[in-house]
Amino acid sequence: MADNKRTDRPTYAADFIKGDTDSAVFLGNAHIDNLMTVVIALGSEIWADRQRLRIVEKLLSSKGKVTTEMVEQYVPTEEEKAAWQAEREAMVKRVYAVLARDTSKARPFGEERQFN
């Protein structure tokens, strides 16, 4: 990104306090927590690449060339921001909706289902 940092402004940031989340288990199994972390990280990487690709496509169509600096300095229009948000929400729904499915009747694969 563009380097527009001002050093003459006062800062109000507090020192970082490391939490103990590295040893915490949130989903009942540390391996499942690790898999969820990977899935979410991959989704964010895919979205970042997709958004960057949209910028490259826009610059190619409007300017005929693209440089890294042009991509980094690109400022989307309000219409583009709205379109990106809708696209991002649709991707999140497609990719992550399965994580919210009802599993109350789930059973191990291959297990016979009992019908009454």
Image (spheres, rainbow, N blue to C red):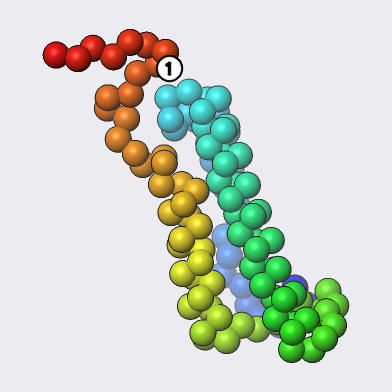
Note whether 59 is above or below 21 in the view shown. below
Q: Amino acid at mark 1?
A: Phe
Residue at 65% from the left image edge and 63% from the top image edge: 50
Residue at 54% from the left image edge and 72% from the top image edge: 84
Note whether 57 is above or below 42 in the view shown. below
Residue at 42% from the left image edge and 24% from the top image edge: 28
For this orientation, the residue located farthest to the left is 116
For label 1, the SS is: loop
Location of the C terminus (image quadrant): top left
* Res 48 → quadrant: bottom right
* Res 23 → quadrant: top right
Residue 94 visible in the displayed image: yes
Note whether 10 is above or below 53 in the view shown. below
* Res 14 → quadrant: bottom right
Q: Judge the density around disc 1: few (<14), some (14-19), many (≥20) Cα neighbours within 10 Å.
A: few
Residue at 41% from the left image edge and 47% from the top image edge: 97
Note whether 82 is above or below 108 in the view shown. below
Q: Position of residue 71 (x, y in %)?
A: 76, 76
Side (left or right) of 26 relative to 52: left
Q: Nearer the viewer, residue 16 or 79?
A: 79
Q: Nearer the viewer, residue 59 or 110?
A: 110
Q: Position of residue 83 (x, y in %)?
A: 51, 76
Q: Position of residue 29 (x, y in %)?
A: 48, 23
Label 1, on which residue? 109
